[in-house]
């Protein structure tokens, strides 16, 4: 009953002193709002990175001309790598039969282009040239038709597999576009397959693409560009052995001396996870002291307001003591009131924080996902703030002399 009474008095205070209540709760609102907004965005980014790794596979790595990650980790090495020679389809064809620890060695290259079919135009699609292994190396389940084959690549067959959105927008009046013509870069390609809807992640629509044989892609965009080689280890446990073998063979292929640096780069999902893990830890590390300051300020404001409340209700405390209320009951009443006010601020901050993260995700590529533990953390923290900073005012109220309290005007 004491708890319910304290909560009821707290709500009476909320209604009776709206401006004072708002200023009291502002620190808690800002603190919990910051926690929920940032954690929701970071948690969403965590899920995005995990999805990227899941789509590619943990046993897959990529051979590239330049390692883009070095732009963040070693800028001098990145600049030096810009002089690396292009990787070619001949490199892939030379490497594939010599890899003993790899199950698949594929090649791909990408460029943006417009797709046309009849009077419809699908602009700025990702046009990917690939060898037939792409369907094994990536998560691309088919909705209709078939994937590319080795024969398509060997003969530079002008066929294409479309993403879900591209197929839907180019052929709005046809449920099955397989067998129909799509124009890419002035050349006609026959649609042989449509990939299932892969959704949108971090603002990136994963259905806006067309996959064509890499040999046909060279006719569209030229063969002078560097391609990427994607390699899947035969086993996850043997991933490092496969990387070492690929490095050795590529050094042999490029005729590098023992002390010469690699003129190519290897990148894998574990590198992405490691870099992202460091970034998220740094963000969380910076968030803790910033939010801590806000919550401490909010706690101090709460304590001061509760002291004012004790002064205003001195006579009430005196009456209760004269009627037999014990010291512990008085202290409990004011402590419950302080915790209720603090948690109310936390609840408002949680709602605003989630709405803020959602709005940011709509207006930017940042993803948004609710982490249940962050809500519990916000509520738990505001509960502790209320209990901690409300103890002194409650103790002071409980220590009032009933005779002096009854004389108070």
Image (spheres, rainbow, N blue to C red):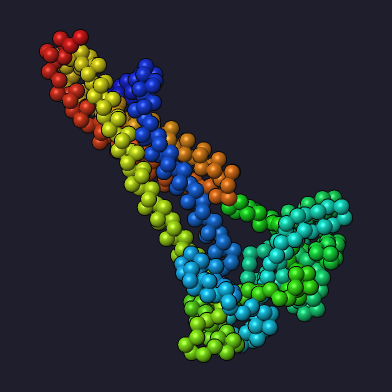
The number of discs equals 0
User: Vertical placement of 400 versus 206: above or below?
Assistant: above
Q: Residue extending furthest right?
A: 118
Say whether residue 303 is left or right of residue 399.
right
- Percent coordinates x, y for residue 183 in the rendering: 83, 62
The part of the image, by quadrant, that contains residue 145 is bottom right
User: Vertical placement of 69 versus 48: above or below?
Assistant: below
Residue drawn where x is 36% and y is 27% of the image: 23
- Percent coordinates x, y for residue 409 in the rendering: 20, 9
Q: Is residue 131 visible?
A: no
Residue sitting nearer the eye, 167 or 357: 357
User: Vertical placement of 332 versus 109: above or below?
Assistant: above
| Quadrant location, the N terminus | top left
Residue drawn where x is 57% and y is 61% of the image: 52
Residue drawn where x is 65% and y is 81% of the image: 92
- Percent coordinates x, y for residue 244 in the rendering: 50, 82
Residue drawn where x is 47% and y is 35% of the image: 352
The part of the image, by quadrant, that contains residue 53 is bottom right
Residue sitting nearer the eye, 275 or 192: 275
Say whether residue 181 is left or right of residue 399.
right
Q: Is residue 359 visible?
A: yes
Say whether residue 384 is left or right of residue 125.
left
The part of the image, by quadrant, that contains residue 104 is bottom right
Say whether residue 375 is left or right of residue 337.
right
Residue sitting nearer the eye, 3 or 367: 367
- Percent coordinates x, y for residue 41 in the rendering: 49, 48
């Amino acid at each position: 009953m004491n708890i319910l009474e304290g909560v009821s008095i707290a709500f009476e205070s909320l209604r009776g002193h709206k401006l004072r209540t708002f200023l009291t709760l502002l620190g808690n609102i800002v603190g919990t709002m910051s926690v929920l907004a940032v954690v929701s965005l970071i948690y969403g980014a965590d899920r995005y990175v995990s999805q990227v790794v899941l789509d590619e596979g943990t046993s897959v790595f990529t051979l590239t001309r330049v390692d883009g990650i070095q732009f963040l980790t070693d800028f001098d090495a990145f600049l030096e790598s810009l002089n690396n020679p292009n990787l070619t389809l001949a490199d892939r064809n030379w490497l594939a039969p010599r890899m003993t620890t790899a199950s698949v060695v594929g090649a791909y290259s990408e460029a943006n282009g417009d797709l046309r079919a009849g009077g419809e135009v699908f602009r700025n699609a990702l046009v990917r040239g690939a060898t037939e292994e792409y369907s094994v190396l990536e998560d691309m389940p088919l909705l209709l038709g078939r994937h590319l084959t080795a024969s398509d690549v060997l003969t530079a067959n002008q066929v294409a597999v479309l993403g879900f959105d591209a197929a839907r927008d180019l052929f709005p009046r046809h449920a099955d576009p397989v067998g129909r013509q799509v124009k890419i870069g002035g050349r006609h390609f026959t649609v042989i397959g449509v990939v299932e809807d892969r959704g949108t992640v971090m603002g990136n629509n994963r259905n806006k693409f067309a996959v064509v044989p890499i040999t046909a892609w060279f006719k569209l965009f030229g063969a002078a560009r560097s391609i990427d080689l994607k390699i899947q280890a035969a086993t996850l446990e043997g991933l490092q052995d496969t990387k070492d073998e690929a490095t050795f063979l590529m050094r042999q292929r490029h005729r590098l001396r023992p002390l010469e640096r690699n003129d190519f780069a290897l990148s894998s999902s574990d590198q992405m996870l490691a870099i992202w893990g460091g970034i998220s830890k740094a963000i969380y590390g910076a968030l803790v002291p910033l939010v801590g300051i806000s919550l401490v300020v909010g706690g101090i404001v709460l304590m001061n307001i509760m002291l004012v409340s004790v002064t205003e209700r001195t006579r009430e405390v005196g009456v209760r003591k004269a009627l037999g209320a014990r010291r512990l009951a008085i202290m409990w009443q004011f402590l419950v009131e302080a915790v209720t006010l603090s948690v109310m601020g936390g609840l408002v901050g949680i709602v605003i924080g989630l709405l803020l993260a959602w709005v940011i995700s709509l207006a930017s590529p940042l993803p948004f996902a609710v982490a249940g533990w962050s809500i519990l953390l916000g509520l738990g923290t505001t509960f502790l703030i209320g209990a901690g900073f409300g103890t002194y005012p409650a103790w002071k109220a409980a220590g009032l002399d009933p005779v002096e309290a009854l004389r108070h005007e």
